[in-house]
Image (spheres, rainbow, N blue to C red):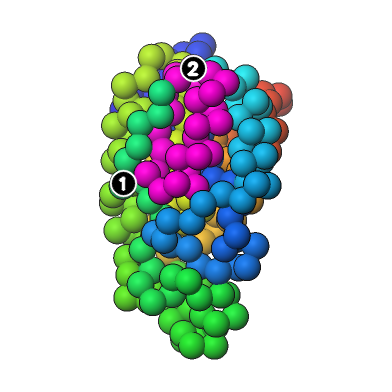
Amino acid sequence: MSGAKSGGPGRRIVLWRHGQTAWNLERRFQGSTDIELTGTGVAQARRAARLLAGLRPDVIIASDLSRATATAAELAAVTGLEVTTHAELRETYAGVWQGLTHDEIIERHGEEYAAWKRGEPVRRGGGELETEVADRAAPVVLEQAAKLPENGTLVVVSHGGTIRTTIGRLLQLESRSWEALGGLTNCCWSVLGEGARGWRLLEHNAGTLPEAVLGDDD
């Protein structure tokens, strides 16, 4: 994709995590399991949608898991845009980890968990590598972003792990460094902006609208 033109803000990608689910509250690993939003999760999505509508998005795409599509539907309702779903934007498949609580994972798969946290390539629970998640998700995001009008905005409604790996790939970071990108709170988002040398991370785990950077680093 070409860099931003001089004098314009360039294209933006907003990566928005879904609202709260019951498994989030229980600290239970969801992965690709299809878990619905709680009532609180719906309210979170509705509030965030009102804010994100202020960015005047051009396109909304989402994971086809219900917690993502329900979140995206709230933004569609206030913008009038349609949501296109993509299975490639699903959360990481994590095999036998799925459905386990955080404590159960530590107890049963402690070495595997520790290796993952060290940045080693690990098939958690016999599932996907993080790089494989990026291999499927990042091309979808880039393809949709390339279709945006100049200075357009794409909203991607997905999952914490998938968003982190996608950001890491788009920023061209080494995969062992992706963990340095902290997790996203339910219904918070990160914003990538198109710069002269590629994509830049403008906001991370935000719950308010991005504001202009004023000063020497703008």
State whether residue 192 appears in this view: no
Name the quadrant containing residue 58. top left
- The amino acid pointed to by label 2 is Gly
In the picture, measured across the screen, residue 212 lies left or right of residue 28, that is right
Magenta part of the protein: which range? Answer: 57-81
Quadrant of the rendering where the N terminus is positioned: top left
Q: Amino acid at mark 1?
A: Ala
Name the residue rendered at 54%, 88% in the picture.
Answer: 107
Q: Secondary structure at mark 1?
A: helix
Q: Percent x, y for residue 75? A: 54, 28
Label drawn at residue 153: none
The residue shown at (38%, 77%) is 96
Which residue lies at the image location 58% right of the left edge and 40% below the top edge? 189
Q: Which residue is mark 2?
A: 80
**Whole-number angstrom distance, CA of label 2 to CA of label 1:** 23 Å
Please name the residue that numbered disc 1 is placed on.
Answer: 87
Q: Nearer the viewer, residue 58 or 36?
A: 36
